[in-house]
Structures are given as structure tokens and as C-alpha cells.
Amino acid sequence: MEASAAADTIWRVVDPAPRQLPAPEAVDRALGVLADAQRPLIVLGKGAAYAQADSVIREFVEASGIPFLPMSMAKGLLPDLHPQSAASARSLAIARADAVLLVGARLNWLLGHGESPQWSAVANFVQIDIAASEFDSNQPIAAPLAGDIGSVLTALRDGLAAHPITVPAEWISELAARKTRNDAKMRQRLAENPQPMRFYNALGAIRAVLQENPETYVVNEGANALDLARNIIDMEVPRHRLDTGTWA
């Protein structure tokens, strides 16, 4: 068969990623849950990276003031060194958050199925998902938001005028104190020069290269390297960390 004839047999998709707008009442409900929280948290998952809605994600995060925690493949949507990042206080943020906005993240095994004691037993979950069938699969979702991430985050951002969110200073300070403590421990480990070399030293060398070349792609394998690299190697650019499984 001629290539031109073969090309004619391939269907052209008119709109491969159609917008799916959230219901206004769902947006109001979600903002209410976040506004009432004492310890709100945003979790960015790989779905947020897939969505390529980087600008509106950043706008909502910064306008709301809510601390965020990136999953491995969502690193770089906002720089890891962003002041609202709770990455270096991950365990505390998860254990203490009382309202959690899941953006392109699902409560699967990677997030301990949302179960206590890893998560607070009183945490209310707000979930953005393109597939409504994913809601309530492992934990009850207090405020489900069915729609594409770009449309939902735009609605949430615009809704802040009517439903302002003020993150309590005590929560910000609690996370900041843990971040300071953990960052100091990290610097100490990275400064060591043991023989033979350990994980921290090998990954520290990669970290240094990435700091000078932020556009570099990182392909990461599993087990200890996967977990430690998430904590050690800062990402500044979205979709440049490719983990085992979906991508690698």
C-alpha cells in the first residue's frame, strides 16, 4: 500500500481533549471546604502535568496561598524551591492537612489510599478528575470536581473573589519549621564524602548538574533511587522528570 493511501485510512480526531466545565455549585462547595480548613494542602499529581495547564495551576496556588505538595512527575509545575512548596515537609503536610485539594492525583497506593495514620483521620478531600467514576474510590470525596484541570482551576481561581481563602499563619509556620529542619539535615548529608559513595552523594552530583542545567530531563528508576531522588533533586521545569511506570 502506498504511504499516502495508508495515511488516508487514519481517522483524524477533531477534538482530542475537549473542555469539560465543572458545575458552579461544585466549585462553590470546593472553595468552601478549602476556606473553612485550618490546614489546607494542594497535591499536584501527574495528571496536572499531563494537562499542561501550568499557568492557571500556578495562578490558583499563589492566589489561594495554600501550600502544595508535588507528586514525583508533577515536580517542576511550580519550582521545587517555591516558597509554598511543602515537599521537604511531606510527611508532616500529609499527616496534618485537614483539607486536601487533589489536582490530577488519585488516592491510590502512591498516596496510601488516603488512609489514617498516614493521612489525618479528619481530612476532607477535594478531587479534580476528568472521570467522575474515580470519585469515592478509596476515600469519600467531600467536594468532587468533574472536569478537565484547566477549566476547573480557572473556575476555582475566578471563584476566589467570592470565596476568599486565608491560610492560617500557624499552619504556614508549622510547615516552615519542619522544612528548615529537614533542609538542614539534607545539606549535612550532601556535604558528606563517605567511602564508598552512598545514594545521597551520587544523587547530590546529579542535583548540582540540574541546578546549572534545569532543562535537563531526568529518567528515574524505582525503589530507593526513586524515593530519594524525589527529595534530593529539585526540578524547575515541568514534565522533565520521567519516572518508572507510565513514562520510563
Image: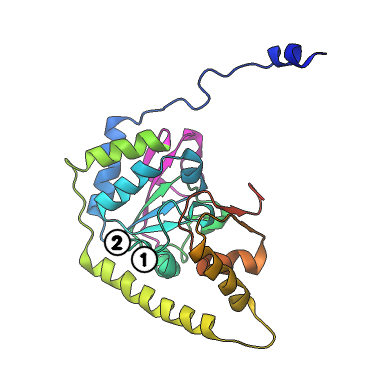
Q: Is residue 206 left or right of residue 131?
A: right
Where disc 2 sits, the SS reads: loop
Which callout, 2 or 1, points at the residue further toward the start of the chain? 2
Residue 137 lies in the magenta-colored region: yes
Q: Position of residue 110 (x, y in %)?
A: 56, 56
Where disc 1 sits, the SS reads: helix
Q: Position of residue 226 (x, y in %)?
A: 61, 63
Q: Position of residue 27 (x, y in %)?
A: 29, 37
Q: Is residue 73 left or right of residue 81?
A: right
> How many numbered circles does the render carry?
2
- Label annotation for residue 32: none
Q: Is residue 176 left or right of residue 201?
A: left
Question: Crowding near pointer 2: few (<14 within 10 Å), some, many (20+)?
Answer: many
Q: Nearer the viewer, residue 111 or 124?
A: 111
Could you give the CA–CA distance between mark 2 and mark 1, rounded to whole angstroms? 7 Å
What residue occupies the far right of the structure in this picture? 1
What residue occupies the far front of the structure in this picture? 212
- Label annotation for residue 39: 2
- Quadrant location of the N terminus in the rendered image: top right
The vertical placement of 67 against 149, above or below, is: below
Magenta residues span 120-148
| Residue appearing at x 30%, y 43% in the figure | 30
